[in-house]
Image (tube, helix red, strand yellow):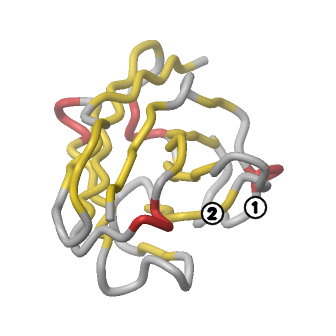
């Protein structure tokens, strides 16, 4: 099993940037495909980004393409989500997720492990 803890959230003005981190413990992160999701109040959990074990492939949700970048440092057992050009509609609780399945995953059901989530608020 793997445990996931997100950090780096907070309040930022529209147009600003934030970097989220997901620290993992338990099994080494290099054995997992990792993903980021978000959930705004009253909405379903939404796919943000996914990265394969060896960083060979990344996938993004349409609403964040060109603004967000997912990366990972397997030596540090950490996954990152760099967010630029933030918009008020990016306001949500952001979740880190992991799956032992090979290949990127875009659905909530594709992940087995979840962090507790961290709030990102973008003010207009």
Residue at the spot of label 2: 47
Q: Secondary structure at mark 1?
A: loop
Q: Nearer the viewer, residue 72 or 27?
A: 72
Q: Nearer the viewer, residue 90 or 27?
A: 90
Tag on residue 66? none
Residue at the spot of label 1: 107
Quadrant for the N terminus in the image: top right
What is the CA distance from the residue labelled 2 to the residue labelled 1? 7 Å
Instruction: Give the x, y percent position of residue 106.
Output: 67, 66
Q: Quadrant of residue 29?
A: top left
**Residue appearing at x 47%, y 20% in the figure:** 27
Mark 1 burial class by Cα count in 10 Å: few <14, some 14-19, many 20+ = few
| Left or right: 57 in relation to 114 | left
Q: Nearer the viewer, residue 87 or 73?
A: 87
Q: Is residue 108 above or below residue 49?
A: above
**Is label 2 in contact with label 1 (beta carbons under 8 Å)?**
yes
Mark 2 burial class by Cα count in 10 Å: few <14, some 14-19, many 20+ = many
Residue with the most extreme front position:
124
| Left or right: 6 in relation to 72 | right
Instruction: Give the x, y percent position of residue 92.
Output: 53, 48
Ranked by sequence position, the earlier of labels 2 and 1 is 2
Instruction: Give the x, y percent position of residue 40.
Output: 63, 51
Q: Secondary structure at mark 2?
A: strand
Which of the two marks, 2 or 1, is nearer to us in this view?
2
| Left or right: 13 in relation to 42 | left
Q: Is residue 60 above or below residue 78?
A: below
**Residue appearing at x 60%, y 65% in the figure:** 103
Quadrant for the C terminus in the image: bottom left
Q: Quadrant of residue 112?
A: top right
Instruction: Give the x, y percent position of residue 53.
Output: 42, 53
**Residue appearing at x 49%, y 76% in the figure:** 60
Q: Quadrant of residue 76?
A: top left
């Amino acid at each position: 099993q793997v445990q996931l803890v997100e950090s780096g959230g907070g309040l930022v003005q529209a147009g600003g940037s934030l970097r989220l981190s997901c620290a993992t413990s338990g099994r080494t992160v290099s054995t997992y495909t990792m993903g980021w999701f978000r959930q705004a109040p009253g909405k379903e959990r939404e796919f943000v980004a996914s990265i394969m074990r060896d960083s060979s492939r990344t996938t993004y949700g349409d609403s964040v393409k060109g603004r967000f970048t997912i990366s990972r440092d397997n030596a540090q057992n950490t996954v990152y989500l760099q967010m630029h050009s933030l918009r008020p509609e990016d306001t949500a609780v952001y979740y880190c997720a992991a799956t032992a399945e090979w290949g990127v995953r875009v659905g909530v059901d594709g992940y087995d492990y979840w962090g507790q989530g961290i709030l990102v608020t973008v003010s207009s």
